[in-house]
Each structure stands twice: as structure tokens, then as C-alpha cells.
Image: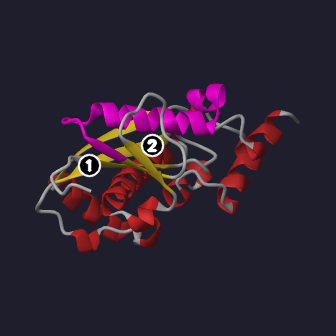
């Protein structure tokens, strides 16, 4: 691949959560980035991830795209994830010449893209996108947990942990819960 090509990496987080939006980031790295810091966001501790995210933001062009809980319900989680990816790509301050996307699906209408399974583990620019998206979404769920404190979102970020499921059984669902997802759907159909 041409070294001077403007390449964007794209990844999403939150597909498997029971609550909150799905979030994607699109990143174009600048020359000053420390590539050694970039790896799959799931393999970096919460504290370290925050610092690395700030380093990436200072040394890249990036954008974040979201798809709402309503979009997840109305379209499905895959389509919502693709919407969030497309929004992130469209919000980039400069347009990439090549787009590398984690996974095996890409938003409709893209040109010059490549999907890469486990791209967040293999490709540094996708790792950067996964880190920015994860930190953004985690902070969003921590903020929501201040208002909705019965679900331990500040620890589980909306994933279906025991504390989250116990909160659902005891307090019911919130506007941030994904009504089409099995545990939530079961509660609603009782």
C-alpha cells in the first residue's frame, strides 16, 4: 500500500451491550503518533486506555459517530453499527483515500474500503479507532450511571453483567435499554 495514502481506520464498540448507543470512531493517524501504544482496546486497562486515547486524539484526525437505542430497535444492531461507522467517516475533517474497517461488514455507499476480521488486533489505525470509540462510550455510560445508578453502568458500561441484570429485575428498564435485546425483551413480555 502506498505510504502517502490517507488511510482511515474504523471500529465500533457496544454492539453486545444491553443499554446505550453503539459508538464508532474513524481515525487518520498523523506522523507523530507512538505506534507502540496502539493495540486492541480490550487488551488495555481502563486507566491506560484513557491516556492513550488522548495521545491518539492529539496525533490524528478523528471523528465519532453514534447510533441511538431507537435506531438499534428499529433497524437492528448490525445496521445501527454501520450507521455509526458511516457517521464517523463522514465527520472526518479530511476525507480518506482508503478506509480499513474492523469486522466483515461495511456501511453502504463507501468506496475504497477493506473489511478486516480482528482488524483491531492487526492494524494500528483500526486499534486507534477502537481505543477512541471505547473510551468515548465508557465515559458516556459512566455519565448515564450518575442518573441511572441501579445498573452499575459505571463498571459494566451497559454489558449484561450480573449487577446489570439484577438491576433490571429489581428496577425495570430505562429509556437507555435496548428493548429488542433478549434479557430486556423477556422483562417487557412478562
x then y, percent, for residue 39: 36, 69
Q: Is residue 87 left or right of residue 56?
A: right
Q: Residue furthest right?
A: 190
Q: Is residue 161 left or right of residue 158?
A: right
* Residue 180 in sight from this viewpoint: yes
Q: Is residue 119 magenta?
A: no
Q: Residue furthest front?
A: 1
Badge 2: residue crowd in 10 Å (few <14, some 14–19, many ≥20) = many
Q: State the quadrant of the N terminus.
A: bottom left
x then y, percent, for residue 25: 36, 45
Highlighted range, magenta:
70-99
Q: For residue 23, which numbered disc appears in the image?
A: 2
Q: Which SS type dominates the magenta stretch?
A: helix
Badge 1: residue crowd in 10 Å (few <14, some 14–19, many ≥20) = many
Query: For residue 85, which quarter of the picture?
Result: top left
Q: Residue furthest left?
A: 32
x then y, percent, for residue 186: 82, 41
Label located before the other in sequence (1 or 2): 1
Q: State the quadrant of the C terminus.
A: top right
> Going 45% across and 36% down the picture, which residue do you hit?
84
> What residue is shown with label 1?
7
> Going 65% across and 30% down the picture, which residue do you hit?
73
**CA gap, disc 1 to disc 2?**
20 Å
SS label for mark 1: strand
Amino acid at each position: 500500500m502506498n505510504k502517502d495514502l490517507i488511510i482511515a481506520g474504523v471500529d465500533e464498540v457496544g454492539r453486545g451491550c444491553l443499554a446505550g448507543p453503539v459508538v464508532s470512531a474513524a481515525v487518520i493517524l498523523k506522523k507523530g503518533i507512538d505506534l507502540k501504544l496502539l493495540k486492541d482496546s480490550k487488551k488495555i486497562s481502563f486507566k491506560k486506555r484513557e491516556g492513550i486515547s488522548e495521545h491518539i486524539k492529539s496525533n490524528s484526525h478523528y471523528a465519532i459517530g453514534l447510533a441511538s437505542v431507537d435506531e438499534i430497535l428499529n433497524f437492528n444492531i448490525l445496521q445501527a453499527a454501520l450507521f455509526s461507522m458511516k457517521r464517523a467517516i463522514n465527520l472526518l475533517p479530511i476525507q480518506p483515500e482508503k478506509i480499513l474497517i474492523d469486522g466483515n461488514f461495511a456501511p453502504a455507499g463507501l468506496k475504497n474500503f477493506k473489511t478486516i476480521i480482528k482488524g483491531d488486533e492487526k492494524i494500528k489505525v483500526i486499534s486507534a479507532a477502537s481505543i477512541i470509540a471505547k473510551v468515548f462510550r465508557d465515559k458516556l455510560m459512566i455519565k448515564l450511571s450518575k442518573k441511572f445508578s441501579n445498573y452499575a453502568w459505571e463498571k459494566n458500561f451497559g454489558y449484561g453483567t450480573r449487577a446489570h441484570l439484577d438491576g433490571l429485575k429489581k428496577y425495570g428498564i430505562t429509556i437507555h435499554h435496548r428493548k429488542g435485546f433478549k434479557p430486556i425483551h423477556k422483562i417487557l413480555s412478562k
